[in-house]
Amino acid sequence: MFRDLLNFRRYAAAAGAIAASALLVACGSGGGGGGAESGTLRLALTDRPACGYDAVFVTIQKVRVHQSGTAGESDAGWSEIVLTPAKRVDLVTLQNGVLAELGQTPLPTGKYTQLRLVLAANDATTPLANSVIPTGGTETPLTTPSAFQTGLKLNVNIDVEADKLADFVLDFEACRSVVKRGNSGEYNLKPVVSVTPRIFTGIIGFVHTALAVGTTEVSAQLAGVPIKSTTPDATGKFVLGPIADGNYDIVVAAAGRATATVVSVPASSAANTVLNDATTPIDPPVSVTHTVSGTVTITPAVTPIDAVVVARKIYTGGPTVEVAGGPVDGDTGAFSYVLPSGAPVKSAFVTPLAFAVDGATPTGNYTLVATTGALAPKSLVVNLTTADVSGANFAFP
């Protein structure tokens, strides 16, 4: 799963220690007027949970920045952080506030609007530079488009001020960056990345230890869109950060449990927000589950099929939250989600949290939303209260 990101104070000291292997190579003037004044850009990497994967490895060669959003890869004015040797990172390990430092570089002052993340290629020397380990499976290469060796282009808004540190995090959304290819055993890498300032605070809370078994995801959402997600540790603790200032709905989605949401939880760069402690963990009611499945087709046909389907729950009186989602199968367009049929619960941000059942019927109603490219999204309401639903199909355009 790059969005507004925050790190925790206990990681601040480590964040200051930049890997000695990160080495600056400047190309051209950097577009800053001859470098009379300069600041410093520092970058790190984080991730959202990787659904269905034990590991997702990417190998980063360098990160390039430019003041022009339209600059070509061979134009003058680029500055780079080159990692020597290239850095192989398991994205799945970058949760609960953990960051992988990429390095730092002095830059001429100014506004930088283009960033390119350059990944290594899977070749004879490093056949698993970018790879995935499906849960219960074996390590498999990730097919990476050749364009990513010249850099995955990201639009950014980075201000570098004189004698100051511009500190940013790249959020590599592994769950939506890996696309399964039917029964071929192959997987494509389609990076979903965002870039946001690094802040040293976040939202901390606890779920019941019975939920801390790898099948629980906790997310901070805005208007039904996850901004930051993680999985709790063995004690039930979760850390949602880095994350930007704002009010978020905190959603707990656990296997065999009803969806639980804490509404309008504030996050602030001034201090950590404590949602609850280990003595009052979030423990959603047990729920029967049912499966919704279907396909996405696109005309004219494309290979691989590039589409995402999410399942949203609409609470009475709000909010709307995402319970599950991800890319469809790249070959078949198929998707399948196991969702709770029981009534969801929600609480205001109070101490202690006080969850109430949303008894609106049917309790197993979900809205599926399919998106692909620049086409308008399509939606479909399904009812999983008493049975599985198959044939939840979407056709574009």
Image (cartoon, rainbow, N blue to C red):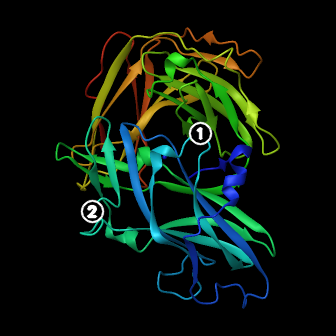
Q: Which residue lies at the image location 38% right of the left edge and 45% below the top edge?
A: 55
Q: Which residue lies at the image location 49% right of the left edge and 81% below the top edge?
A: 72
Q: Which residue lies at the image location 44% right of the left edge and 48% below the top edge?
A: 174
Estimate the x, y position of residue 76 in percent, counting from the top left: 55, 89
Local packing at callout 1 (Cα closer than 10 Å; few below 14, some 14-19, many 20+) is many
Estimate the x, y position of residue 230 in percent, counting from the top left: 54, 36
Q: Secondary structure at mark 2?
A: loop
Please state which amino acid type lies under the numbered disc 1: Asn
Q: Which residue lies at the image location 36% right of the left edge and 36% below the top edge?
A: 52
Residue that carries the numbered disc 1 in the rendered image: 96
Estimate the x, y position of residue 235 in percent, counting from the top left: 58, 24
| The residue positioned farthest toward the front in the image shown | 20
Q: Is residue 209 above or below residue 273?
A: above
Please give the label number shown on residue 230. Answer: none
Q: Secondary structure at mark 1?
A: loop
Horizontal side, residue 30 vs residue 189: left or right: right
Horizontal side, residue 40 vs residue 319: left or right: right
Q: Looking at the image, which is closer to me, 127 or 230?
A: 127
Local packing at callout 2 (Cα closer than 10 Å; few below 14, some 14-19, many 20+) is few
Q: Is residue 378 above or below residue 187?
A: above
Please state which amino acid type lies under the numbered disc 2: Pro
Q: Looking at the image, which is closer to me, 316 or 20?
A: 20
Q: Is residue 302 above or below residue 147?
A: above
Please give the label number shown on residue 127. Answer: 2
